[in-house]
């Protein structure tokens, strides 16, 4: 019987939650056609919520979080993949209510996996992970709606986070002038190293919140935090500009008038990476492995093992992490 290491979140009788690395058996995994030996995962904010018992993410415990996984196929009952194939799994229910990537093995429906493109290693795929995939969808949304570098600056909110930092790097590499917005003044050099042309403090974005419209500043926006930051970004977008929305760490509420939409023709695009269909999912991974492959992946990355995850989970919940945290299951 195959055993493996996994991060397990357990709920006590007093409704508190604890995390520990334990030994599990493959036959304890949920049903699914595809069994994968996980090489790498990554830490996302949603993982930290799951690991803390947030009922909006995970309801059943004990549970192994990890919404990302990259590894090698051990077996596939429906022949969608062959033994030895390298695959990437992001989104769907992985790590939410299905045992996730913070473990050496996962068992899932084969439809949740895509073949790793040749231009990415398994490690590089998980430096990107859900955060990088979401950033790619956001940048793609701007480009497909005809936002070009010549149109002006692109604002990225939550710029030091996983999605934000990858978005800054992708946009800068594509020739855009990027404004990184962050509450971490100490990380300005980090954002400049990723290609940001300038960095603003989030407090400056929140000035004049009472106004229904603000000065036109940005040709496009990648918003990763929601709430009043998204509202202020919309108010500051140029005529015909495009705003993408993918996060809610600040708030799920949006208090904004219709004026930016009907007086400036601003477009608001919702970005969802969880249920993204397979064909566009494969197409975007191919881009991220090809024309959009980042040169600064190492600069984005802190690498940890399962035993170091507990402290990183606490740190991301406190807003203390920057860039991407890669989980190496062999460490």
Image (cartoon, helix red, strand yellow):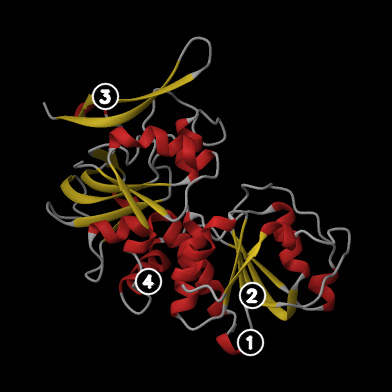
Q: Looking at the image, is mark 4 or mark 2 earlier in the sequence?
A: 2
Q: Looking at the image, is mark 3 or mark 2 earlier in the sequence?
A: 3
Q: Residue at x 68, y 47 (%)?
A: 252
The label number, if any, that marks residue 151 in the structure image: 1
Instruction: Give the answer, above or below, for where 65 lies relative to 228.
Output: above
The label number, if any, that marks residue 208 in the structure image: none
Question: Is label 2 in a helix, a strand or a loop?
Answer: strand
User: Dot 3 corresponds to which residue?
Assistant: 22
User: Dot 2 corresponds to which residue?
Assistant: 220
Q: Looking at the image, is mark 4 or mark 3 earlier in the sequence?
A: 3
In the figure, residue 198 lies in which quadrant? bottom right
Instruction: Give the answer, above or below, for where 122 lies relative to 233.
Output: above
Instruction: Give the answer, above or below, for where 13 lies relative to 271.
Output: above
In front: mark 4 or mark 1? 1
Question: Is label 1 in a helix, a strand or a loop?
Answer: helix
Q: Are marks 4 and 3 in contact (CB under 8 Å)?
A: no
Q: Residue at x 53, y 15 (%)?
A: 15
Q: Are marks 1 and 2 in contact (CB under 8 Å)?
A: yes
């Amino acid at each position: 019987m195959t055993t493996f290491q996994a991060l397990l979140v357990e709920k006590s009788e007093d409704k508190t939650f604890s995390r520990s690395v334990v030994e599990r058996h493959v036959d304890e995994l949920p049903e699914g056609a595809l069994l994968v030996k996980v090489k790498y995962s990554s830490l996302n904010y949603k993982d930290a919520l799951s690991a803390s018992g947030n009922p909006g993410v995970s309801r059943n415990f004990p549970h192994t979080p990890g919404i990302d996984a990259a590894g090698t196929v051990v077996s596939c009952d429906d022949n969608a993949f062959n033994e030895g194939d390298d695959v990437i799994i992001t989104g769907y229910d992985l790590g939410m209510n299905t045992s996730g990537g913070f473990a050496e093995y996962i068992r899932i429906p084969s439809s949740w996996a895509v073949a790793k493109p040749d231009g990415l290693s398994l490690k590089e795929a998980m430096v990107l992970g859900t955060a990088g995939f979401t950033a790619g969808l956001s940048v793609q949304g701007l480009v497909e709606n005809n936002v070009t570098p010549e149109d002006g600056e692109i604002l990225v909110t939550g710029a030091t986070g996983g999605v934000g930092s990858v978005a800054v790097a992708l946009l800068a590499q594509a020739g855009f002038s990027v404004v990184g917005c962050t509450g971490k003044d100490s990380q300005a050099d980090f954002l400049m190293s990723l290609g940001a042309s300038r960095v603003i403090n989030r407090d400056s974005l929140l000035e004049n919140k009472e106004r229904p419209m603000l000065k036109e500043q940005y040709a496009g926006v990648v918003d990763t935090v929601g709430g009043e930051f998204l509202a202020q970004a919309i108010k500051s977008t140029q005529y015909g500009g495009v705003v993408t929305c993918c996060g809610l760490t600040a708030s799920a509420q949006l208090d904004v008038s219709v004026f930016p939409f009907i007086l400036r023709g601003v477009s608001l695009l919702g970005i969802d990476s969880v249920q993204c269909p397979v064909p566009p999912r494969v197409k975007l991974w191919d881009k991220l492995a090809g024309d959009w492959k980042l040169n600064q992946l190492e600069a984005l990355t802190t690498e940890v093992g399962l035993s170091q995850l507990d402290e990183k989970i606490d740190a991301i919940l406190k807003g203390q992490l920057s860039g991407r945290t890669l989980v190496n299951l062999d460490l």
